[in-house]
Image: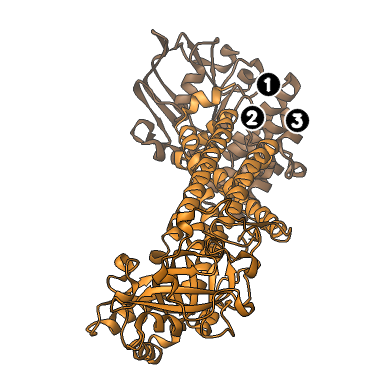
Chain colours: A brown, B orange
């Protein structure tokens, strides 16, 4: 069963007068409840594909289906609501809201979804506990280490138990030890929450931990390979 | 964590910039409120001055206001006593009235024949009791108003009070103890000569005899024949405006009526109505219109603003200055808040991208930045108002005085901020609206940022 269907997806950017193809006719299925990594060299289209999967960008042609919903049919408001409900994001630079505490950052997606305050607090506490930061709930992001911030970001991404979690180079800003711990945590959380994790990464540790790898080169899909081969 | 709380935290996060912006807004609010309070005091002070002098409303002959200065006696109100009684007995009007008193204006020539000088004057016959009642009005609780009675109080029926300009021309400064009253260098011989027929008119002894200051007032009777009254000048009073000071003669109403109407039935130029409150003017005017309708005389009601055009001119000038100051400060606030918000949008581009990625709609981003503008406006309005109240208190207790145009005495320099809820509210609302408007454009720009570009922003 697939969580995501990508049909003949193309995306071009214009750099001045030059047309730069970022993705060229990509079609693929991404399995549900799996750990999938988008891999490839810089400029291969990983981030572009991830942005399109997450509904952050719109394709020039083709379409994406997430959790049974064609994203190209949604207007901006409905797409925002869809992201809030069904997609979690983990960013390379963590992107926590600096004025909110760890708990409030985790609560924020729940707030957008209209979850009651008491339930928000309960779920945020549960998630922070799950990522090992129960005692840091009242800390602001500036008071946390990089690894701790990424843990909070993972808890935030899972707050609404979304169908899909997208992570753009989640370990790129962490040392290898912390990166390994974060990968282990994400793997653990993916299993615990039965959700689909999709990453873009060069990280060999992450590739090794993935169930599936999607290889991209020059905006085109290379032959899907087994994890071990990709690693 | 709602939008306002998030907005507040974002403002606190950039303390220095927020404080700088707030400071600009506070200075603006203080400037508008202090000048507005000064303007308010001027406006109410002028109104009080005019209402104490000539009432809120006057009933006059229809043509008196436009043509009466040429021949006041020709536009008199007949049977005025009965009309006044009708007004005072009217169940709708009476509760609104504080004073009802008649006046009679007249034009004439005042002469100090002992010195061989004369000049044209504008006389006003008044009822002393009524005039003293008019002087009691202080609905706006103005500070520093003169409390003394009119100078004619307790004087003989032929007493008069002249302007210092009249005293100067009639060479009465010394006996009337008028200060700063220079004597002419040399009198024109031709001008000194008093026509023999006029010189023969006074029956009484000339001025300065028997220790009294006396002048003769020649006026035309309503019938057209000349009449002369010998008046005892009890005081020379500065009238504030030179043009008025040079022609003013105030006398008792009965004396003025004797002069103008002789043995005929006396009339008056106007019935002065002072109301308990200025806010009752529309109701009083409406009732007066009903009462005067269908009467035997063509009477109209004039308000103090019409009778004293300088009221509108002065208040209009101050309103224009206040408006200019407000617009200037509004523009400064607009650009200050707009600049602050624009900088915030640039600095928080990644944060905006993150919020949008997490599912916050464009409207949510707009709401967030507009809320920050709203909070800045609220803070600026509150702190600015408090500071203005404190500063106004200091000014009001500093003992400063000033000489308003047209006044003969210095009055306390006051600013009315405390209790002026309308002005405080208007300033606060104006600032908040400006602040929100200033934030709107950067907020709109933030909301329309491309999410991917925003997330990539360095």
The furthest residue to the front: B196
Q: Looking at the rendered structure, which numbered label has been put on residue A94?
A: 2
Foreground of the two, A83 or B109: B109
Question: Callout 3: helix, strand or loop?
Answer: loop
Residue A50 is left or right of residue B288, and the answer is: right
The answer to whether B156 appears left or right of B291 in the picture is right
Residue B123 lies, in percent from the top left, at 44, 72
Subunit under mark 3: A
Q: CA distance from mark 2 to mark 3?
A: 11 Å
Q: Label 2 near label 1: C-beta < 8 Å? A: yes
Residue B107 location, quadrant: bottom left
**Sequence-first tag of 3 and 1:** 3
Looking at the image, residue B241 sits to the left or right of residue B409; the answer is: left
Reading the chain from its start, which is encountered first: label 1 or label 2?
A: 2
- In the rendering, at what x and y percent does residue A219 appear? 44, 12
| Label 3 environment density (alpha carbons within 10 Å; few <14, some 14–19, many ≥20) | few
Mark 1, other Cα within 10 Å: few <14 / some 14–19 / many ≥20? some
The residue positioned 42% from the left and 76% from the top of the image is B201
User: Residue A173: which numbered mark, if any?
Assistant: 1
Which corner quadrant holds the C terminus of chain A? top right
Label 3 – label 1 distance at C-alpha: 11 Å
Q: Is residue B144 left or right of residue B107?
A: right
Percent position (x, y) of residue A159?
A: 59, 42
- Residue B252 horizontal/vertical position (percent): 49, 81
Residue that label 3 marks: A145
Question: Callout 2: residue from which chain?
Answer: A
Instruction: Report whether residue B90 is seen.
Output: yes
């Amino acid at each position: 069963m697939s969580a995501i269907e990508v049909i003949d997806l193309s995306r071009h950017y214009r750099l001045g007068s030059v047309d730069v193809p970022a993705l060229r006719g990509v079609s693929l299925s991404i399995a549900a409840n799996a750990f999938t990594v988008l891999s490839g060299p810089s400029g291969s289209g990983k981030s572009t594909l991830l942005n399109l999967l997450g509904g952050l960008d719109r394709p020039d042609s083709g379409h994406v289906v997430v959790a049974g919903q064609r994203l190209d049919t949604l207007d901006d408001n409905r797409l925002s609501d869809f992201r809030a409900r069904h997609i979690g994001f983990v960013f390379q630079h963590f992107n926590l809201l600096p004025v909110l505490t760890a708990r409030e950052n985790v609560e924020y997606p729940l707030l957008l979804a209209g979850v009651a305050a008491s339930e928000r607090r309960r779920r945020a506490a549960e998630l922070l506990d799950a990522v090992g930061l129960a005692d840091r709930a009242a800390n602001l992001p500036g008071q946390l280490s990089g690894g701790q911030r990424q843990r909070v970001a993972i808890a935030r991404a899972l707050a609404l138990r979304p169908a899909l979690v997208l992570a753009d180079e989640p370990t790129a800003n962490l040392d290898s030890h912390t990166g390994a711990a974060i990968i282990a945590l994400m793997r653990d959380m993916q299993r615990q929450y039965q959700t689909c994790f999709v990453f873009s990464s060069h990280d060999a540790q992450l590739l090794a931990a993935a169930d599936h790898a999607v290889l991209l080169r020059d905006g085109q899909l290379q032959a899907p390979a087994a994890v071990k081969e990709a690693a | 964590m709602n939008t306002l709380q998030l907005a507040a935290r974002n403002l606190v996060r950039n303390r220095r910039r927020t404080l700088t912006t707030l400071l600009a807004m506070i200075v603006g609010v203080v400037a508008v409120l202090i000048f507005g309070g000064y303007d308010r005091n001027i406006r109410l002070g002028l109104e009080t001055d005019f209402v104490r002098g000539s009432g809120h409303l006057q009933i006059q002959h229809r043509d008196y206001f436009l043509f009466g200065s040429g021949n006041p006696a020709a536009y008199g109100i007949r049977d005025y006593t009965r009309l006044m009684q009708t007004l005072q007995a009217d169940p709708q009007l009476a509760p609104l009235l504080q004073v009802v008193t008649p006046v009679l204006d007249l034009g004439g020539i005042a002469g100090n024949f002992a010195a061989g000088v004369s000049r044209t004057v504008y006389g006003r016959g008044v009822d002393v009791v009524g005039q003293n009642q008019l002087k009691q009005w202080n609905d706006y609780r103005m500070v520093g108003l003169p409390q003394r009675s009119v100078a004619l109080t307790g004087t003989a029926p032929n007493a008069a009070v002249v302007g210092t300009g009249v005293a100067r021309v009639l060479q009465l400064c010394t006996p009337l103890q008028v200060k700063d009253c220079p004597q002419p260098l040399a009198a024109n011989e031709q001008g000194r000569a008093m026509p023999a027929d006029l010189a023969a008119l006074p029956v009484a002894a000339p001025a300065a005899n028997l220790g009294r200051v006396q002048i003769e007032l020649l006026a035309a009777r309503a019938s057209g024949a000349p009449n002369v009254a010998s008046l005892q000048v009890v005081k020379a009073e500065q009238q504030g405006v030179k043009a008025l000071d040079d022609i003013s003669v105030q006398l008792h109403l009965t004396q003025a009526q004797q002069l103008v109407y002789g043995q005929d039935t006396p009339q008056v130029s106007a019935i002065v109505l002072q109301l308990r409150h200025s806010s009752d003017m529309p109701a009083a005017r409406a009732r007066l219109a009903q009462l005067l309708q269908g009467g035997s005389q063509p009477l109209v009601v004039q308000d103090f603003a019409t009778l004293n055009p300088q009221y509108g001119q002065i208040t209009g000038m101050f309103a224009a200055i206040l408006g200019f100051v407000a617009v200037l400060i509004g523009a400064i606030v607009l650009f200050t808040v707009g600049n602050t918000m624009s900088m915030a949008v640039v600095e928080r581009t990644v944060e905006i991208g993150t919020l949008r990625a997490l599912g916050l709609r464009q409207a949510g981003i707009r709401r967030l930045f507009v809320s920050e503008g709203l909070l800045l406006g609220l803070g600026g309005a509150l702190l600015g108002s408090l500071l203005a109240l404190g500063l106004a208190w200091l000014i009001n207790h500093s003992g400063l005085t000033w000489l308003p145009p047209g006044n003969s005495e210095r009055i306390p320099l006051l600013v009315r901020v405390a209790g002026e809820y309308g002005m405080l509210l208007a300033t606060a609302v104006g600032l908040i609206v400006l602040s929100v408007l200033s934030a709107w454009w950067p907020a709109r720009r933030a909301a329309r940022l491309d999410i991917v570009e925003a997330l990539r922003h360095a």
